[in-house]
Image (spheres, rainbow, N blue to C red):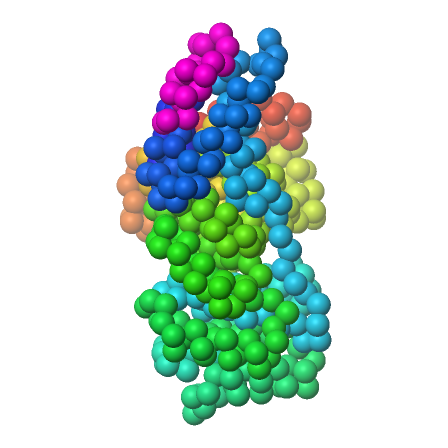
Amino acid sequence: MFESLSDRLEQSFRILKGQGRITEVNVAETLKDVRRALLDADVNFKIAKQFTDEVKEEALGQKILTSVKPNQMMVKIVHDRLAELMGSESAEIETNGSPNVILIAGLQGSGKTTFSAKLAHYLKTKKGRTPMLVAGDVYRPAAIEQLKILGEQTGVEVYTEEDNKNPVKIAKEAIKSARNSGKNTVIIDTAGRLAVDEEMMKEIKAIKDAVNPHEILFVVDSMTGQDAVNTAKEFNDRLDFDGVVLTKLDGDTRGGAALSIKSVVNKPIKFIGTGEKMDALDVFHPSRMADRILGMGDIVSLVEKAQEQYDVDEARKLQKKLAKNTFDFNDFMSQIQQIKKMGNVKDLMSMVPGMGKAMKNLDLDDDAFKGIEAIINSMTPEERSEPKLLNGSRRARIANGSGTSVAEINRLVKQFGETRKMMRMMSSGKGKAMGRAMQNMSRK
């Protein structure tokens, strides 16, 4: 996400590289490029102009320290202004009420139903809530079925009245049901249209008035750019929602919605969707997003994702195996599963400072480890435990069983050996091997 904008901003800052000081001329030249980059990212023209005017005023008023280069100072100013533009601080979701009612609104195709299930999963696994999903889209039969399937996947009850075509009554009955069954959170998925119309607005307003939700979240497809911002304004004028959810940020988004929406509706971006899996939902942190836009990575979010999957007992066992040099393919497979649980591999690697550009042209998706898993699964238990057994005939058999080639088996065995060596060095405090490990991963 934001790859094009990141590249354009980086090019803009090159103008100041090598300059001895910030002047009105070189700042104007730099910010002219920055404004173009923002406009190309589908940021509102007025917002882009105001942004660059504020950056210029701050830059020219700075006393540059001799230890800080002009381009570094400009990056710092732009970073802080980007974070401010997107909301400065992360915003928590409302969790008061018994039950706590959350109303989900947005256009058809924005990802409301999937987000509703993701939010239920998030509240259940990370906040200890007991949510209930409500199928309030009575016009699209697939929406009810989709919510049922997602509810099964997340282990969350889904309230439906498939013969009832009155979403207001469904919402009210769902809240009664939740109260009676001890559910402390109700998430109401509502109907959308392909475009904003009066009928849809009246309906969602009627649901709001009937259930008096503690939180209204507006879901928007981030790939629609400035149109998303305009739609958000119309919804906010009628609903006065509490926060925005940006979906499909794992796609080819230019970033205009994320950078413009806060300024237009003055409501915080609360969540971002970064994939189809139920755990592909992140709390939005403006400063961290500014880091990523400027190619600085997002090591804090990466560490948080790692901590969520961290198993103390498994870590101790792994450390012992590394110390004894008995790390095998079973352990290798276990580590792969841990990484996969953290999310999309390419997105994870882009969080490492300096890795965003290196990962740009690599084709890494959720199936990035599929070939490796097939190879390891084609090994016998003895071969997984003792890699030294992998002679030529065994490698040929594994290649046939996994649908790969002997060359791929050889490459994996070599990479496994390098990984084992690197991990052993890190476990003994020699973390300098991290750089080489990242390089190896980028070549796969």
Q: Quadrant of residue 390?
A: top left
In the image, is 222 to the left or to the right of 331? Answer: left
User: Whole-percent x and y of residue 368?
Assistant: 39, 45
In the rendered image, the residue lying farthest to the bottom is 163
Query: Between residues 287 and 310, which one lies in front from this camera angle?
Result: 287
Split into 4 quadrants, where in the image is the C terminus? top left
Residue drawn 46% across the image and 61% down it: 219
Location of residue 349 with respect to 273 vertically, above or below = above
User: Whole-percent x and y of residue 143?
Assistant: 40, 75
**Highlighted range, magenta:** 15-33
Q: In which quarter of the image is residue 100?
A: bottom right
- Can residue 6 be seen here? The reply is yes
User: Whole-percent x and y of residue 359?
Assistant: 39, 34
Residue drawn 28% across the image and 41% down it: 405
Residue drawn 62% across the image and 52% down it: 91
Query: Between residues 17 and 386, which one lies in front from this camera angle?
Result: 17
User: Whole-percent x and y of residue 42?
Assistant: 35, 44
Split into 4 quadrants, where in the image is the N terminus? top left
Location of residue 365 with respect to 360 vertically, above or below = below
In the image, is 380 to the left or to the right of 134? Answer: left
Q: In which quarter of the image is residue 285?
A: top right
Residue drawn 47% across the image and 35% down it: 51
The question of residue 31 being in magenta is answered with: yes
